[in-house]
């Protein structure tokens, strides 16, 4: 009886240990005890440095970890061998679990992918390890590439790593350089050098050099014939001479007089304005006095004109008086 009890306790202890070990393995391997949603990305480059448990970060903040690495031809087996050789099946499927709650409430991964959310492999220092970095880029520069299978999990598109982009650019440059006809370029360069040599030795370039030399010689002769130092000394003496100083002194005196006269101009203008105003007032008074006189003279002239008309018609009325009224009148 005691032996059976000891065996039972040993068996229960072993089973409990196995259960704890399985739970620990599931916890460390990102099993069901971890919260979050599983996503997958497809990479056309080497995923060296990634492994299960590798961090997935967004701008340095860890949001999850890698849960599975698998070839696309194995994860989504094509129906024919020829299909397996297509480019999509040569990619690597990387699945990772993201805790979207750490990115904020209401985060929509589908909308983020449309806005340019992409996954990229980045090196982690000089250790040879890498991690997956999530960032937003121009969706037109890195469009979503369709795949010929139905994904098991939501897809976050990937973009080439910086090292891969540099390698691709270098390969394109080398391919372009390899297509250049070096022999043709060498022949063209030799022909150009021969043409330049001919122009310098006997062509228009030689004539241009000779003309330039002649022009320089003529300029040198003109400069030697023209006494530039003497002319400069004469100008300096003229500028510092007594006559120039007198002219400058007279100019200063004239300027001072003009400034004095300018200072007196406002008073003179005010006096002239007062004189003009007084003259206007005097003219108005004279006009007021002359108006009655002119009116009297006008009436006198009218009377004299009437009298002259009457004398012209009947000169005798001065002595005999006015003519008798006509017959029949009262």
Image (cartoon, rainbow, N blue to C red):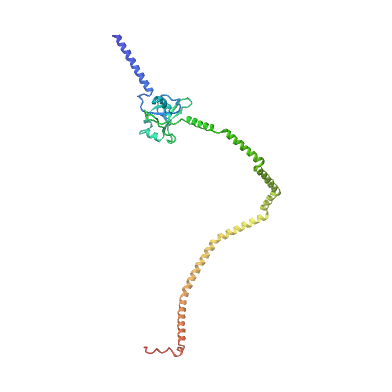
Is residue 189 in view?
A: yes
| Quarter of the N terminus within the rendering | top left
Q: Residue at x 61, y 58 (%)?
A: 254
Residue 18 in percent (x, y) is at: 35, 17
Q: 302 or 222, which lies in front? A: 222
Residue 168 in percent (x, y) is at: 49, 31
Q: 81 or 164, which lies in front? A: 81
Residue 31 in percent (x, y) is at: 36, 24
Residue 216 drawn above or below residue 306: above
Residue 129 in percent (x, y) is at: 46, 25
| Quarter of the C terminus within the rendering | bottom left
Among all residues in the image, which is located at the extreme left?
1
Is residue 71 in view?
A: no
On the picture, is 291 further left or further right than 210?
left
On the picture, is 193 further left or further right than 318?
right
On the picture, is 130 further left or further right than 18?
right
Residue 254 drawn above or below residue 112: below
């Amino acid at each position: 009886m005691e032996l059976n009890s000891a065996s039972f306790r040993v068996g229960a202890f072993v089973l409990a240990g196995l259960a704890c070990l399985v739970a620990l393995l599931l916890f460390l391997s990102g099993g069901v005890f971890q919260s979050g949603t599983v996503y997958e990305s497809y990479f056309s480059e080497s995923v060296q440095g990634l492994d299960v448990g590798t961090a997935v970060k967004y701008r340095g903040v860890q949001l999850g970890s890698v849960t599975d690495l698998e070839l696309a031809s194995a994860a989504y087996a094509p129906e024919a061998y020829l299909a397996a050789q297509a480019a999509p099946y040569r990619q690597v499927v990387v699945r990772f679990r993201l805790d979207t709650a750490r990115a904020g409430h209401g985060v929509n991964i589908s909308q983020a992918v449309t806005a340019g959310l992409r996954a990229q492999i980045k090196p982690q220092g000089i250790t040879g390890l890498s991690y997956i970095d999530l960032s937003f880029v121009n969706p037109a520069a890195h469009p979503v590439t369709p795949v010929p299978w139905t994904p098991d999990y939501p897809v976050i598109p990937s973009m080439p790593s910086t090292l891969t982009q540099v390698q691709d650019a270098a390969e394109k440059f080398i391919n372009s350089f390899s297509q250049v006809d070096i022999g043709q370029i060498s022949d063209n360069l030799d022909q150009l050098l021969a043409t330049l040599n001919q122009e310098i030795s006997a062509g228009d370039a030689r004539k241009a050099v000779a003309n330039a030399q002649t022009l320089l010689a003529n300029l040198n002769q003109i400069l030697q014939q023209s006494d530039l130092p003497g002319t400069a000394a004469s100008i300096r003496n003229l500028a510092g001479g007594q006559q120039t100083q007198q002219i400058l002194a007279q100019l200063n005196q004239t300027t001072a007089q003009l400034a004095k006269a300018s200072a007196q101009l406002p008073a003179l203008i005010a006096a002239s304005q007062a004189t003009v105003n007084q003259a206007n007032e005097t003219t108005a008074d004279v006009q007021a006095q002359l108006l009655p006189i002119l009116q009297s003279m006008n009436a006198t002239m009218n009377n004299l004109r009437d009298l002259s008309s009457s004398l012209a018609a009947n000169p005798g009325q001065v002595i005999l008086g006015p003519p008798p009224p006509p017959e029949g009148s009262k």
